[in-house]
Amino acid sequence: MNAPHRRRPIAAMLLLTAAIQMFAAGNGLSGINEATSMVTSYFDPGTKLVYAIGAVVGLIGGIKVYSKWSSGDPDTSKTAASWFGACIFLIVAATILRSFFL
C-alpha cells in the first residue's frame, strides 16, 4: 500500500521539471528569433557599406592604373587586372553573403 504514495511525489516532480523545461525552451526560442531579426537588420546597411568601400577602392585603383599607364610602366596590365578582380570580388562577395544569410 505504500507504493502508490511514493509515486505521487515523483510524478509531480517530473511534471514540474517538464513544465520548467517548456518555459525555458520558449524563452530560448524568442531569444533566437530576436537575434535573427537583429542580424538580418544589419545586412542592408552592411551591404551598402561594402558597396561604398568597393567604390572608393575602385576609384583609387583606377587612378593608380591611370598613373601607371600614363607614365609608361610595363606593369600596368597586372595592376589593372588585380584592381578589376578586387572590385568584382567585393561586389560578388556582398551579393552572395546577402543571398546566403537572408
Image: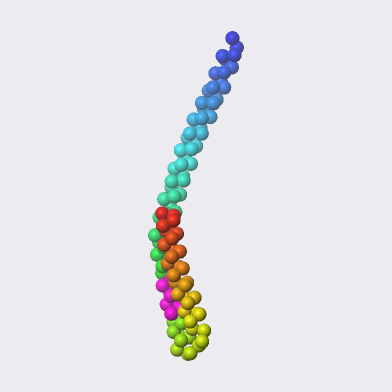
Spot the residue most to the top: 1
Residue 67, image x and y in percent? 46, 86
Q: Is residue 2 left or right of residue 75?
A: right
Decide whether residue 58 is among the magenta residues: yes
Q: Quadrant of the C terminus?
A: bottom left
Residue 3 in the image: x percent, y percent? 59, 14
For the point 49% across and 30% down, the residue is: 19
Which residue, as the protein is rendered here, is positioned at the far bottom? 71
Q: Quadrant of residue 98?
A: bottom left
Q: Position of residue 47 (x, y in %)?
A: 41, 63
Residue 46 appearing in the image: no
Q: Nearer the viewer, residue 83 or 40?
A: 83
Question: Is-magenta flag for residue 96?
Answer: no
The rendered magenta stretch, by its main secondary structure, is classed as helix
How many discs mark residues in the rendered view? Answer: 0
Q: Residue at x 59, y 9 (%)?
A: 1
Of residues 52 and 69, the one nearer the viewer is 69
Q: Which stretch appears magenta?
A: 54-62
Residue 68 versus residue 47 in the image, above or below = below
- Observer able to see residue 55: yes
**Residue depicted at 50% across the width and 88% down the height:** 73
